[in-house]
Amino acid sequence: MPNDLLIEQIVRAAILEDIGRGADITTDSILSEQIVARGSIIARQRGVVAGQRAARLTFALLDPRVGYEILADDGAEIDARAPIARLSGPARTILTGERTALNFLSHLSGVATATRLLVERIGSHRARLVCTRKTTPGLRTLERSAVVVGGGSLHRYGLDDAVLIKDNHIMLAGGVGAAIAAVREKIGHTTTVEVEVDTLEQLREAIELPIDALLLDNMPVEMLRQAVAIVAGRVLTEASGAVTPENVASIAATGVDLISSGWITHSAPALDLGLDIEATSEKRRA
């Protein structure tokens, strides 16, 4: 899981995007600096919590005097109307950071909730659900963390940490064999090589070459079952393409090792959360 130093640049950029040249002109016009407030972040629907560290860091960067008490840790399943965090401190800061913090929490909790749904539907099958590079620009680190707390697993982080030879690579290289030979000449022995195939003919060719995994792209369920039988455990098999809550169980039942889903990061519905202010008071002047 990423530490606060890794996510601070993401949170800082989100705050700066919202406050522009440094002021919340609505809040600062209405409230004096002396007003303090207490409030809670409340779930409006059932789901899985994620993004607490990003939310807490939002307020800490704006004003370390804001207290942020986590009531539901990342990964916790919560019901509608459940409080997930309690805030206290300068009212101006709480209102200024509200939307940025809720954006992180709502989106990342949505990712975790969608992930948990697919993992539960995979059930006792051997397949692990993994994320993809279909992430929101700038939020990949946080979205991957949300996948993990939702019960999913991780694919490669980016283009630099594993080889995934896709259809366009194969076409431009002149074939599966040529593409694999080219990467094997240049990469180190610790780098894994995965090849995307969409026909059984391509699979039979690729399985005889020095690879570590096969991405079975958009194959119907029956073809996936045949592919798994042909591979017979020699390399990892990954099913990918149009994975939904409705079909993920049938895909898992084919015996694939991995199921990759872009939906859990690029299309997961945000979890509905809100900040309810519970009390305000004015600090005594010295």
Image (cartoon, grey):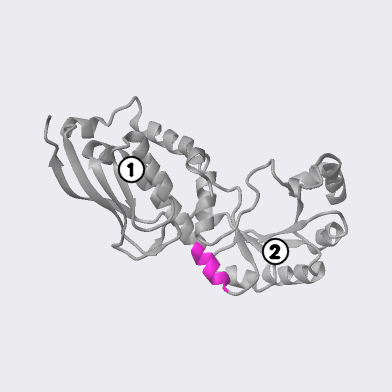
Instruction: Establish if 14 lies above or below 218.
Output: above
Magenta span dominant secondary structure: helix
* Residue at the image point whose x is 54% and y is 71% from the top: 121
Q: Secondary structure at mark 1?
A: helix
Is there any visible trace of residue 245 in the rendered image?
Answer: no
From the top left corner, tell me how far across and down residue 147 is, in percent. 53, 56
Instruction: Establish if 250 lies above or below 240.
Output: below
Contact check, label 2 and label 1, Cβ < 8 Å: no
Instruction: Establish if 147 lies above or below 223.
Output: above
From the top left corner, tell me how far across and down residue 192 is, in percent. 76, 50
Residue identifier under label 1: 99
Name the side, left or right, on which 191 lies relative to 9: right
The amino acid on which the numbered mark 1 sits, given as a three-letter code, is Arg
> Is-magenta flag for residue 56?
no
Q: Nearer the viewer, mark 2 or mark 1?
A: 1
Magenta span: 116-123
From the top left corner, tell me how far across and down residue 66 is, in percent. 29, 41
> Is-magenta flag for residue 122?
yes
Name the side, left or right, on which 209 lies relative to 83: right
The amino acid on which the numbered mark 2 sits, given as a three-letter code, is Met
* Residue at the image point whose x is 84% and y is 60% from the top: 207
Residue identifier under label 2: 219
Q: Nearer the viewer, residue 53 or 237?
A: 53
* Residue at the image point whose x is 23% and y is 36% from the top: 92
Please state, as top left, top right, bottom left or bottom right, where the C terminus lies in the image. Answer: top left
Q: Nearer the viewer, residue 73 or 182?
A: 73
Instruction: Establish if 149 lies above or below 25.
Output: below
Q: Residue furthest front?
A: 286
For the residue carrying disc 1, how many other residues have a C-alpha within 10 Å: few (<14), some (14-19), or many (20+)? some
